[in-house]
Amino acid sequence: MSNRWFKVASAAFFLGMLSACGGGGGDSSVPGGGGVVTPRATAAETSRFLIQSTFGPTEAEIEATRDTTFAAWITAQQALPEGTLALDYLNTRRDQLRNPPAPAAPNPTADVNAGHFYAYFWREAVTSQDQLRERTKFALSQIFVISFAEPQMNVRGLGSYYDMLGRNAFGNYRTLLQDVALHPMMGVYLTHIANQKEDLTTGRSPDENFAREVMQLMSIGVFELNNDGTRKLDSSGNPIPTYTAEDISNLAKVFTGFSWYAATPTNSTFGGGGRNDASFVTPMIAYPNFHSISEKRFLTTVIPATTTPDPAGDLRIALDAIFNHPNVGPFIGKQMIQRLVTSNPSPAYVNRVANVFNNNGSGVRGDMAAVVRAILLDTEARNMSAGVDANFGKLREPVIRMTGLMRALNATSTNGLWPVNSTSAPTSLGQSPMASPSVFNFFRPGYTPPNTKTGTLGLVAPEMQIVDEVTVAGYMNTMQTTINTGIGSSNDVKLSYTKEMAVAADAAALVDRVNYLLTYGNMTTARRQQIIDAVTAVTIPSGGTTTQAQIDAALLNRSKLAVYLTVVSPDYILQR
């Protein structure tokens, strides 16, 4: 691809990103509730739906989904068994490392590393059939955060945590909350594993890290909310805090006395002695001697002081109190909307989703399958005219941009291992799965770029928190390399251009195909013409001495250029 078109695309991309921060006028709210979809949706409607609900549409998935309804597609997806589990994959890879084919000698101490998890992620994100679960699991991982950034993180343990999120993706939030609280890798990450009861003699207090973050980030947030996600205000017009420092310190007492699983628990195993494979992937167990027996007051709940420690009972009461807090529906519902559909959902949209969280229609609270269904079938999500509103939609985060490209262009791994390592460097994608720099994810749900029209309009653009001049250039360079030669070790993961090359002699037909696959027909008329002009400039040789190899090379270059100019354009970066 010529440097000229690379430079033109770079400028267009960066200006488009700045424009995206500017926002626009209008109200994206759509009255009514529930989505009604005709049996035969258009290709554009279907592609847009799959952009919201998968790691990216494929041509086959678009056509298959058009033959059903979106509601039926969700039902079928939620009924699918989970694909390959991360822990199973990592165990298999470890066995292969420890017992390599002859003549290599066995290496009994060999172990998996973060790169093996990344390979698993990319393989499943691109090739797994249970796309809705995979996409929901990834969204949950950005709310219930643990990360390879923690030096003590165990790779197999992190894999089992990711599996746990997938297992609960369509389960009940209450179960998810407990599984998160008791997973040893969350215990390591937010330091409540081996958390000890208070000691007035030494001045020791229970670790408050998880107690604070489980409320702030994973359940109720810092301010009381109306059911539509707007903040409640006191008589002076100020937001009302959901909890106090005392709530945190008292809740922290609940999370004392839980530590590493051991078949025969002892004081030594409480501190991590004798850990084995099971310790990193099995829920923490209670060690009553280390659990606080003092009174615990939090969120209007009181657990009386006792002489007999009851860690399991105290945990149940605490998690029930959090689960039943009225903030959970709008707080979690809005974040899931932001991850899947739009950064600035209308209060009416949030209210409808929160209502489903509160009651799935059968009297069940916290049904995540119903919540995901409500998000994707809501009229605001399904209304194609919403894409016209400058405030509707979201920036596709870098990982989702890459998976979208890979799925659209039928990416395959040459060696079958999908060896795509960390892409967190700002000179790469600036993001890797399960590798955020803090518990606040790579970007906060309430982030507003400073000094932009977005802030003036009171809007948020979470993904813009990891956008700057370096990450823009890093993304573009990474995409250029991926499109041209592949990505991963030795450029192992490669894209296929067979179908694009088949129509590339007609520049307009090629661009329309790319538009259909990558931007659900959302490419602006001006952008379409710009890319057609660029593609046309790549001449297809002809004449008596022209070989088929020369023609194929030109068709391939046209295809790569059309794809590249699309994925660096605002039409692709912005999910509308």
Image: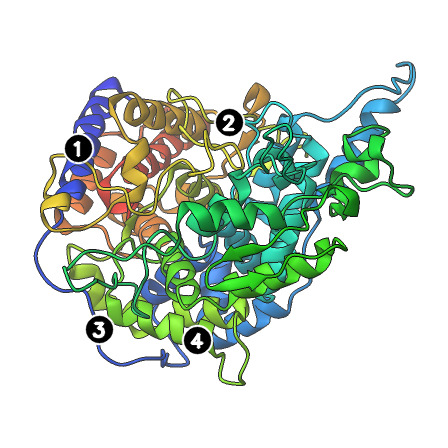
**Disc 2: which residue:** 487
Q: Nearer the viewer, mark 4 or mark 3?
A: 4
Disc 4/disc 3 C-alpha distance (Å): 17 Å
Q: Secondary structure at mark 1?
A: helix
At x 68%, y 51%, the residue is 293
Q: Nearer the viewer, mark 4 or mark 1?
A: 4
Q: State yes or no: discs 2 and 3 in contact (Cβ < 8 Å).
A: no
* Residue 69 visible to the viewer: no
Q: Position of residue 361 (x, y in %)?
A: 49, 84
Q: State yes or no: discs 4 and 1 in contact (Cβ < 8 Å).
A: no
Q: Position of residue 524 (x, y in %)?
A: 17, 50
Q: Secondary structure at mark 3?
A: loop
**Disc 1: which residue:** 12
* Name of the residue lying farthest toward the bottom: 362
Whether residue 411 is situated above or below residue 457 in the rendered picture: above
Total numbered badges shown on the rendered structure: 4
At x 50%, y 59%, the residue is 60
Left-right relation of 232 to 544: left
Nearest to N terminus: mark 4 or mark 2: 4
Disc 4/disc 1 C-alpha distance (Å): 41 Å
Nearest to N terminus: mark 2 or mark 1: 1
Q: Quadrant of the N terminus?
A: top left
Whether residue 53 is situated above or below residue 6 in the rendered picture: below
Q: Secondary structure at mark 4?
A: helix
